[in-house]
Image: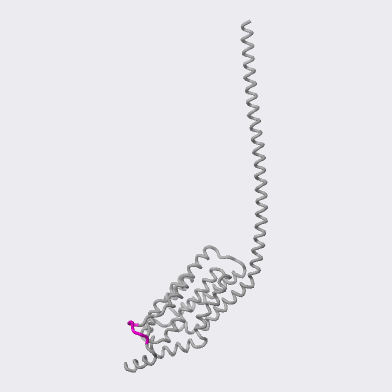
Amino acid sequence: MTEVVISTSIVTATLVTLAIWLARTWLIERLKADIKLDNDSKLEEVRSELQKANNNLSHISAAGDKAYSQVQASLLPTKIQAIEVIWSSVLAWDEMAAASMFVSVLDLDWVRKYGSDPSTKKTFEDLLKAPSHLDFLRQRKDVEKMRPFVSERGWALYSAYHSFYISRITKASILTIPLISHVEIFERANERNLIEKSAPKHILDLYDSNLLDGTNEYLRYLKEVIITELKLEMSGERDSNKAANNAAEILKAANDLAGSVSQKPENPGGKPFHTPETHNNALQADV
């Protein structure tokens, strides 16, 4: 009897254990199924939200492209005008090419010796007479209004061309004024730095070896890259980061050069300026 009770208890305990295990297993699997179902549902919700966001972005992008195109189209006439003004200014400087080339062949010893000679004054007055060089010095203000409508590189290249000519015309202009420190201006104007920043090395090397040939080659090169950049501007292409960085270097060098020749030259030896009559009397006294 005792053995039957024990056997029954063992069977009952086993069944209870089995039932607990089955219930636990079922509960775990149910929880897993519920969790999976919940995760799948949430994943689907996320996918749905992402798809909606993607669609919205596509609409926004399309709207942005359309708006950008409309803005570009509205700016096109102004861009065309800006390019015309800038290119006309580039071509206008050609009229001062003779004075620029003349300055190219003057070394510092010649400037120091003959800068105040009456024949020097007469020569450069004739070179600068027609057209008036002062008109070219003023034209930058008109072109400056067009800056917002061209690329940074386009503006930097134009500034390089303009500043180089400003430097040359300023040198020519001071040679019409006797008894000032002409050499100071010639030494102060760092054309070489501008060429180094804005042109290939072979042009810089040519400038170092032959000032006249280097000048001609540099100005030809600048005109070519300016017109290329303006064409890119018309096509709607934008500056790369590299081009923008290079533009900043060119613009700084151009501004430095223009600034270097805008300062008033000192009187040699701290002496006051002389009138032409006084200068002629001094020359006659020397004779």
Colouring convention used in this rendered image of the protein: one colour
Q: Is residue 198 left or right of residue 12?
A: left
Given residues 196 and 155, the one toward you in this image is 155
Quarter of the image that includes the N terminus = top right
Residue 234 colored in magenta in the image: no
Q: Give the image location of residue 187, x and y in percent.
A: 39, 77
Residue in view at x 58 percent, y 77 percent: 85
Q: Give the image location of residue 257, x and y in percent.
A: 45, 74
Residue in view at x 64 percent, y 28 percent: 27
Relative vertical location of residue 93 with respect to residue 281 in this rendering, above or below: above
Residue 269 colored in magenta in the image: yes
Given residues 225 and 254, the one toward you in this image is 254
Q: Which quadrant of the figure has residue 256?
A: bottom left
Q: How many marks can you see?
A: 0
Residue in view at x 48 percent, y 86 percent: 128
Q: Give the image location of residue 70, x and y in percent.
A: 66, 65
Q: Which quadrant of the figure has residue 18?
A: top right
Q: Give the image location of residue 243, x and y in percent.
A: 53, 65
Stretch in magenta: 268-273
